Image (tube, rainbow, N blue to C red):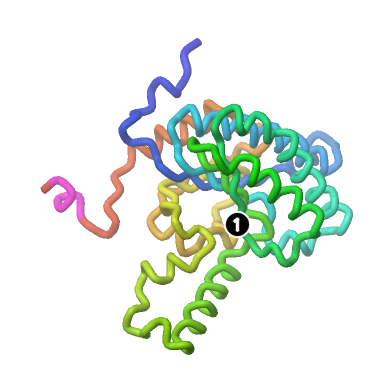
Amino acid sequence: MPTLLDKIDATRVPAHVAIIMDGNGRWAKERSMERSAGHVEGVNTVRLITEAASEAGVKYLTLYAFSTENWNRPQTEVDALMHLIVIAIERETPDLIKNNVRLDMIGDFSRMPAEALGRLRQCMADTAHCTGLTLVLALSYSARWEITEAVRQIALKAKNGELEPEDIDDAAVSSHLSTAGMPDPDLLIRTGGDKRVSNFLLWQIAYSEIYVTPTYWPDFDKEQFYGAIIEYQSRERRFGLTSEQLTK
């Protein structure tokens, strides 16, 4: 069966795709189901899109799984989400290893339940040897928290004489972020239709191409993911330059 994967230019695949996975609750509400049912269905989409990213040749896939603001949701939903995330990742770890996918996490782990964090770190350790796609889960994550932490670390180094103020540049800040060592996202996808970035990778997405789809996350499939990459490949990335400068 023909697939949009065949239409992707393999020489211009985004190295890093970040996704704001939105719409689980609305998907469930429209079907007169509990919000938790949308989160459960969303886990299946995570599996599909991880496979799609690997098949397309993406090197890093970062998923906004749980924001620091999500801690303010009803406790029952927070507990269910945490339990679901841990169970799902543990269940998928053998397939991640089989498909050479390495698991990583970014976020404020001080707020996470110790047992959940320990189990997720075990999954990270189990996949540490994998050399294909890196699947990054943003858990208890906030870009403002991340930037604040980076500023605090840099200030402490300057105070201790380990870093001169004039040496603080973009690269220095980037090296103190939780994504240090990763390329910035080339493509940011948001499902669910909302046109905002929701405190996600604010520093890193400065020049990311943004793709918004009204499709709720549980309905977002491989073909739509491939379509987003094809749309990305149709755009001219100027990074502040003019089109004429790019052609010289």
Total of numbered circles in the picture?
A: 1
Where 64 falls versus 140 (above or below)? Answer: above
**To which quarter of the image does residue 43 belong?**
top right
Residue marked by disc 1 = 106
In the image, taking residue 101 as reference, residue 162 lies left or right, namely left
Amino acid marked by disc 1: Ile
Can residue 212 be seen at all in this image of the molecule? no
The residue stretch that appears in magenta: 242-247
Q: Nearer the viewer, residue 17 or 109?
A: 109
**Residue found 46% across the figure and 64% down from its top:** 203
State the image coordinates of residue 186 (x, y, percent, origin top left). Answer: 41, 47
Instruction: Tell me the SS state at disc 1.
Output: strand
**Residue found 59% across the figure and 40% down from its top:** 214
Count neighbours of disc 1 (C-alpha within 10 A) and say few if under 14, some if 14 to 19, many if 20 or more.
Answer: some
Where 205 falls versus 214 (above or below)? Answer: below
In the image, taking residue 56 as reference, residue 109 lies left or right, namely right
State the image coordinates of residue 63 (x, y, percent, origin top left). Answer: 59, 47
**To which quarter of the image does residue 13 belong?**
top left
On whether residue 246 falls in the magenta region, the answer is: yes
Where 77 falls versus 71 (above or below)? Answer: above
Main secondary structure found in the magenta portion: helix
**To which quarter of the image does residue 114 belong?**
bottom right
**Residue found 54% across the figure and 32% down from its top:** 100
User: Residue placed farthest to the top in the image?
Assistant: 1
State the image coordinates of residue 106 (x, y, percent, origin top left). Answer: 60, 57
State the image coordinates of residue 120 (x, y, percent, origin top left). Answer: 71, 48
In the image, taking residue 198 as reference, residue 112 lies left or right, namely right
On whether residue 51 falls in the magenta region, the answer is: no
**Residue found 52% across the figure and 47% down from its top:** 18
Can residue 154 be seen at all in this image of the molecule? yes
Where 52 falls versus 79 (above or below)? Answer: above
Q: Nearer the viewer, residue 91 or 205?
A: 91
